[in-house]
Image (cartoon, rainbow, N blue to C red):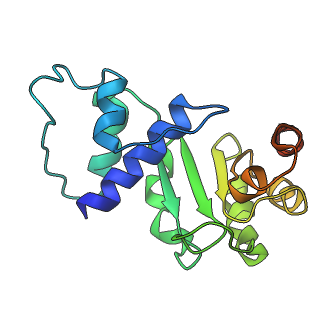
């Protein structure tokens, strides 16, 4: 759906352009703010895609930004393996998407391990329930990038938590 694609592109842009801070707004705002649309005065460009590979190719080759895909806990990796040669990162959801504060799902780590064995240089990001007590599990499975929300925003010392999480995956 269009909303899913917008969220997908927004996640890519956040991953690509943000390091220690949050980016808020729509994917359209993010694109305009990054000068990826030739003439923002014209408005968004519309393009029809027949399949995921066309989306990935467009993002990488025409927008010239790194491209990734997100995989929900129930999605089989064989569904995304055909795209692995065309993407820069895979985001493995370690919770069911929808709201913050959920518990980390360690049963998803075999996906991270499989991806790491298939593509040793691929950026593998994990999102959901990542905290000081779960980060080493994800890192040892092969994740080299993380998304953490509640663990940071609820921490008494957010910078210390950020440093601890970062040190585990670097």
- Horizontal and vertical percent position of residue 151: 78, 56
The image position of residue 34, as x and y in percent, is 37, 23
Question: Relative to 98, does residue 91 appear above or below in the rendering?
Answer: above
Is residue 43 something one can see in this rendering?
yes
- Give whichever of 170, 27 is nearer the camera: 27
Estimate the x, y position of residue 134 in percent, counting from the top left.
Answer: 85, 63
For residue 91, side relative to residue 153 (left or right): left
**Which residue: 51% across, 71% down?**
98
Left or right: where 37 falls relative to 8: left
Q: Quadrant of the N terminus?
A: bottom left
Q: Farthest residue toward the front?
A: 156
Give the camera-side residue of 98 and 81. 98
**Residue 58 seen in the figure:** no
Q: Quadrant of the C terminus?
A: top right
- Left or right, 51 with reference to 73: left
How many numbered markers are drawn? 0
The residue positioned 32% from the left and 32% from the top of the image is: 31
Q: Is residue 121 left or right of residue 33?
A: right
* 80 versus 8 height, above or below: below
User: Which residue: 68% across, 54% down?
Assistant: 149
Vertical placement of residue 169 versus 52, above or below: above
Q: Residue furthest left?
A: 42
In the rendered image, residue 8, in percent from the top left (x then y), is placed at: 40, 52
| Nearest to the observer: residue 150 or residue 44 | 150
Q: Residue at x 72, y 51 (%)?
A: 153
């Amino acid at each position: 759906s269009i909303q899913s694609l917008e969220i997908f592109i927004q996640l890519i842009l956040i991953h690509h352009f943000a390091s220690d801070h949050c980016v808020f707004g729509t994917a359209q705002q993010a694109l305009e703010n990054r000068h990826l649309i030739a003439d923002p005065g014209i408005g968004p460009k519309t393009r029809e895609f027949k399949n995921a590979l066309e989306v990935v190719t467009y993002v990488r080759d025409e927008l010239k930004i790194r491209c990734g895909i997100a995989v929900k806990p129930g999605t089989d990796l064989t569904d995304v393996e055909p795209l692995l040669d065309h993407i820069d990162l895979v985001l493995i959801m370690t919770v069911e998407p929808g709201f913050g504060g959920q518990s980390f799902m360690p049963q998803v780590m075999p996906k991270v391990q499989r991806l790491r064995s298939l593509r040793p240089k691929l950026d593998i990001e994990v999102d959901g329930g990542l905290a000081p007590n779960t980060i080493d599990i994800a890192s040892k499975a092969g994740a080299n990038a993380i998304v953490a929300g509640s663990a940071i925003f609820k921490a008494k010392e957010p910078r210390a938590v950020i440093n601890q999480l970062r040190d585990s995956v670097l």
